[in-house]
Amino acid sequence: MLENYLPVLIFMGVGLLVGIGMTAAGLILSPHRPDREKNSPYECGFEAFEDSRMKFDVRYYLVAILFIIFDLEIAFLFPWAVVLDSIGTFGLVAMAIFLGLLVVGFIYEWKKGALEWE
Amino acid sequence: METFVFYIFSAFMVLSALMVISVNNPVKAAFFLVLSFFASAAIWLLLEAEFLAIILVIVYVGAVMVLFLFVVMMLDINMVQIKKGFVNNLPLAVAVAIAMFATIFFVVGGESFSQSVFTIPDRHGADYSNVAELGKVLYSDYVYSFEIAAVILLVGIIAAISLTLRRRPNTRHQKIEDQIAVKSKDRLQVVKVDAQPRKYEPAKEEQK
């Protein structure tokens, strides 16, 4: 089975070489004359007025957490789709219960307004 | 060849895990954690657990680490403040670390991971599908744990919503259903006004 993944390994090796090679070539070959203006952060032509670290709304986390949960749901769907013809009705019913439970969560989320961006 | 690949990815994993706890910038630490997840996915792939390896990349690298980076990039952490007292607390920290390591080592020491406990799994041919093998047992023998996973995800949804959802009634936003349901008489009011002939009044000339 592992021989199927040899191209992936070669691809990773080539990617690593290209990435390191270009960065190294840039470091070695390019002229390096920094000054204060070049090193200052550039913010669309005006002076930077704020630190990039700031407190922000917790709703972004809510969206990300809900995304992760449904991402995991998709992860359970992949092997099910591969073996669907060999597990038959039992597997179909099992997945129906699984999805039914998550649809309960989805309806809760919808009705609660967690998907609204007010 | 496989041993060689295993040692390369193990070295990547251990080194990047070391970097996670030693670099100053938390964003860089998060990226090293991504590298360590990638390396462990490659090691799982060497064990022919291809489904787990790909799910590790999709779920952990794709979703969880995005959330981590999100948090780390936006939190206002003052690194100088955190570093304060590092030297003073170092002996205590080292003592706790040694105590924890010793506990773990004596309870689940090297013997528990030796090849007599975990035999090397059988190698399979090119047409072997780990996803199909997993699916065959997951939806028949382990169907109960599969449904429990759904319940845990449901609990996760409800917990995330009840912990973080805040109503904010003062913000201005569109209510699309109200806009669609509006009738013409809600917007336009026709007022009856009796028609009256109006006298023409010439404008008075201003007198100087």
Image: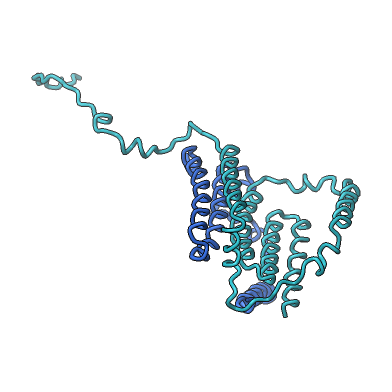
In x, y percent, where is residue B74?
63, 48
Q: Is residue B40 above or below residue B70?
A: below
Q: Is residue A28 above or below residue B139?
A: below
In x, y percent, where is residue B144?
60, 51
Frontmost residue, B42 versus B189: B42
What residue is at 47 percent from the left and 35 percent from the top?
A: B171
Task: Residue A18: tell me if it is visible.
Answer: no
In x, y percent, where is residue B201?
11, 20
In x, y percent, where is residue B52?
63, 63
Is A30 displayed left or right of B167 in the figure?
Answer: right
Q: Which chain is drawn using blue?
A: A
Which quarter of the picture shows residue B183?
top left
Colouring used for the render:
by chain
The count of marks equals: 0
The N terminus of chain A appears in which quarter of the rendering?
A: bottom right
Q: Which chain is drawn using cyan?
A: B
Q: Is residue B208 above or below residue B98?
A: above
Frontmost residue, B154 versus A10: B154
Task: Residue B155: tell me if it is visible.
Answer: yes
Q: Is residue A24 above or below residue B158?
A: below
Is B96 displayed left or right of B166 in the figure?
Answer: right
What residue is at 64 percent from the left and 73 percent from the top?
A: A19
